[in-house]
Image (spheres, grey):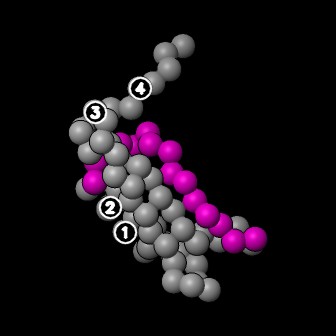
């Protein structure tokens, strides 16, 4: 499985906006990330987004799931 890390970050001393988040989601989907992939985030002490990333599977395979 080939993984590509997609990462977006706010400029230093700033926080991510809704437009930044939208651009991240579009970039991640174009890179092959499925909707069930977990997003990793770095937040400020006040809970504002500073950086987000996801690892997209570039082979097109879906993530394994746990069947209950």
In the rendered structure, which disc, 1 or 4, sits on the residue that comes first in sequence? 1
User: Would you say the residues marked 4 and 3 are in contact, meaning their CB atoms lie under 8 Å apart?
Assistant: no
In the rendered structure, which disc, 4 or 2, sits on the residue that comes first in sequence? 2
- Within-10-Å neighbours for mark 4: few <14, some 14–19, many 20+: few
Residue 25: quadrant of the picture: bottom left
Q: Is 35 colored magenta in this rendering?
A: yes
Note whether 58 is above or below 13 in the view shown.
above
| Residue 58 at x, y percent in the picture | 26, 45
In the rendered structure, which disc, 3 or 1, sits on the residue that comes first in sequence? 1
User: Would you say the residues marked 2 and 1 are in contact, meaning their CB atoms lie under 8 Å apart?
Assistant: yes
Callout 4: helix, strand or loop?
Answer: loop
Using the rendered image of the protein, determine whether residue 56 is visible from the camera's viewpoint: yes
Numbered mark located on residue 23 in the image: 1
Q: Which residue is mark 2?
A: 26
Q: Which residue is mark 3?
A: 61
- Within-10-Å neighbours for mark 2: few <14, some 14–19, many 20+: few
How much space separates mark 1 and mark 4, taking CA atoms?
26 Å
User: Would you say the residues marked 3 and 2 are in contact, meaning their CB atoms lie under 8 Å apart?
Assistant: no
- Within-10-Å neighbours for mark 1: few <14, some 14–19, many 20+: few
Residue under the image location 43 percent in, 74 percent down: 19
Callout 1: helix, strand or loop?
Answer: helix
Residue segment shown in magenta: 31-45
């Amino acid at each position: 499985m080939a993984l590509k890390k997609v990462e977006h970050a706010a400029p230093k001393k700033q926080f991510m906006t809704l437009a930044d988040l939208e651009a991240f989601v579009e970039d991640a989907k174009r890179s092959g990330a499925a909707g069930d992939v977990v997003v990793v985030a770095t937040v400020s002490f006040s809970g504002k987004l500073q950086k987000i990333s996801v690892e997209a599977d570039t082979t097109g395979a879906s993530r394994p799931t746990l069947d209950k």
